[in-house]
Image: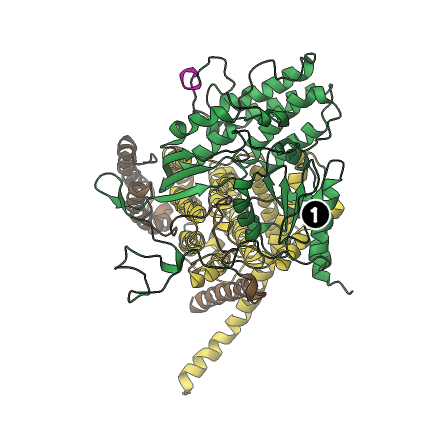
Amino acid sequence: MAVSRLARLAAQAPAPVYAAVGAGAQAAVDGLRADSRLRFVHSPRHATVLLVAGAVPAPFMPPLARVHDQLSHPRTTVWWTGEDPVTIAGLPTLTCLSAGDDVVARLTDAHRDLVYGDRATEEDLLPDVPPNEWRGVGENGQGGDGMMGGVPYGRPMAMTADDRDGLALDPLSLTLGPFLEWLPPGLELHVTLQGDVLTHVELGQNPWLQGAPLGAPVNIDEPLPHLQRTRAKLRYVARVLDLHGLPALAHRTYALANTLTPESGAQIGRLQHRLHRTTALRWSTKDVGHLSSQMLGSPGHPWNGDAMVRWQRAIEDARNLITEPDQGPGQNSDPSPDAADLAVLPALLTGMEFAEAVTTVVSLEVAPGLPSRLTRAPR
Amino acid sequence: MLTAFAAAFGATVGMAVAVLALRLYRADYDPAMLTWSRAVPILGGREPDTHAWSRYHARYLPMTIVLIAFEMEMMFMYPWAVVFVEVGAKAFIEMGVFLLILSIGVLYAWRERVFAWQ
Amino acid sequence: MTGAPMAAMAAMAPAFATQWWAIVAAWGGLAFGVYVLAVLDELSFGVVAGSGLRWRDTWRMPARRAALALSQSPSRTERPDQLLWILAPAAYAGLAVLALSTIPFAPGFAVADVRTGIVVFGAAEALTFVAVYLHGWSSNSALSLVGAYRFVAQGLSFMLVSMFVLIAVALPAESLSVGQIVESQHETWNVIRQPLGLPLFLIVGLGAAFWGPMNLPDSPDLAGGTAAEISGPMYLAWAFARRCMLVTYAAMSASVFLGGYLGPVLPGPVWLGLKSVLVMGLYVTIGHLVGRFRVDRFMTHAWMVLLPLSFGALILAGVVAL
């Protein structure tokens, strides 16, 4: 089949992947981010391949289907789990990967097949119906009485609420869903935005904490397990960098985390030195998301301080961990925070500007890369 | 002068038309694929409750009003810049005083927390 | 048609001939500049990320990524303002060309080197707020809307800085025309006699094209911001328009601070091109080494630090010019 020039060029570009991260898979996906054959995009609409990593419990299947439908054509899904492939009705071209598969190669193959037309694009999973039925009523087609009622084009307009100084402005209520890159896997935030300030924040249900069955976590290829905690800390710092407009430095840190050896202390030191000199990152994270011991319940909690202190501490810990001898898997040493600690978030995020809120959430290291932790019952 | 503006206008419109053509390339890519399901705004998986168009609280509104005052000052500075070297020190002193008065305005605005994110 | 208008148009025809060549040069230069910018971006990413300079891939990568964008499908949202959504990237690119048209490529060779070139440039800069805001607003998506309002905040904050800096370079030239400003740099470039000007104008350029540290409207924490809802050729048009604006600012910086087309051996346009590439290199390096600013902190900083600095630059320029 004569492949057009355009398709051949497009196939050689890095495969745009949107990562929907499930239980126990954050570390595995972070291991892929340093590969230059892939490009992890921020919005599903820019992706051709949806990478679903880890197990997704039943309550999160509808949002996953929504994210899948938001990808632009041609598209396909690659599901990376630690167990037998999952069959999903409506996705005949689903690729299922298990431990030991060369994930990057499979992703790039999927991308190439789509672009060349060898693989058909996937149909929608959710029905093609408007969100609400709407029959225009008013003279401009608006539904209901006047401007305030009804569901024009399927959704209501935002209702007015008093803001302050006698201003009557509109709050937007939305759910920042489970599959955004700056939220920990499975966390949903029900927020009310006035302008870009969060005036009301509620945490969504996180079924992974209530002991829902998860299946086996994704088997990360761990050649040196005793460097796992260092690796997790570095990946956390890389995530902070990525979401603060430093993708190149984030790439470097992810690559460092992948190629970690006991002799990498000098490289981590150089990275730390470089980050201590960045002014913009420190300016953006200083005095943001301050958590005190009272709020957290224990003085030695890893989340103590503001966002800047947290990421600086993380890279300091990474450098120390690599030099001192292995102290065991970490479950019995310093208490790693887990998702139950996220209950401080609503009080913390209320009143914050959006970017500040993102900085805060990203700076909270949750269940750092130890997949088994998520199967533990909450405290 | 007329030819210059006409040429600038022509160049602008030409580029705009070219980018428009790019934007509309393959706009007829299988309309059946522009489904309602795909049309939901990006929020990480859930649907929004309302349309996004709303009376948005632009937190920097007082700053825009201070900006307009400065814009009017800019209007005076454009011709001032052209005759500055001719007129000499007198123009320098005059504009210095003007800038000083406006700086006091900026300081006052800062004290009144105009530049804070309300 | 009567005789007099025909005669008038015939009289203007030779002038139009030069303008046609200048227009073609502007478009071509812009398109080539966008390609060079994309290559520089890839190179600087490779250097900062430690993945090395993969020369063979780098100069082919912009074409590959553009082809990828073209092979994806366009998208829609539930109730967009379709007309404005379509026009926004075209308007933004058109404004980049409008700003570029005030810049001369060689002595006397410009699309529109009018006596009030700086004013036209400032007008184009101001209208970018409309283009970017509409791009974020018209998709009727909450995160895009937040991005649109952020751009207006950042833009208004550095608008004045930009104007003060440009007025400062206009002082020694005694003219608002960019050609005259370039000519006034025969002895010394403005970057030397007005040291504060170029750093401030670099920030302005990054802000107007929302690149690197100023990428607030399209930022990752908004899932792509104003670009979250666009895909395929729509995305390519927007990415192209953004890079056009950055190239225009690079050319302007090169003209008013680095002497534009002035230079010893090579022809004028080549010098302008080399200097613009230098400024573009600075832009991409800053983009990869400096993190994204926060809009509320940046706004305060722009008004309380950058604006007084631009006052200082203006006063310094005034003293030097006298």
Q: Which chain is yellow?
A: C
Q: Nearer the viewer, residue A33 or C52?
A: A33
> Which color is chain A depicted in?
green
* Image quadrant where one finds the N terminus of chain A: bottom right
What segment carries the magenta color? A288-296
Q: Is residue A204 left or right of residue A145?
A: right
Within-10-Å neighbours for mark 1: few <14, some 14–19, many 20+? some
Q: Is residue C127 left or right of residue A102?
A: left
Magenta-colored stretch includes residue C258 = no
Q: Nearer the viewer, residue A214 or A49?
A: A214
Q: Which residue is mark 1?
A: A95
Q: Is residue B87 left or right of residue C244?
A: left
* Chosen colour scheme: by chain
Residue A265 in sight: yes
The quadrant in which residue A366 appears is top right
The quadrant in which residue C155 appears is top left
> Which color is chain B depicted in?
brown
Q: What residue is rendered at 71% in x and 57% in y? A: A119
Callout 1 amino acid? Thr
Estimate the x, y position of residue A107 in percent, counting from the top left: 70, 46
Estimate the x, y position of residue A246 in percent, counting from the top left: 57, 35
**Element at label 1:** strand
Chain for numbered disc 1: A
Q: What residue is rendered at 28% in x and 55% in y? A: A148
Magenta-colored stretch includes residue A289 = yes
Relative to A337, residue C307 above or below: below
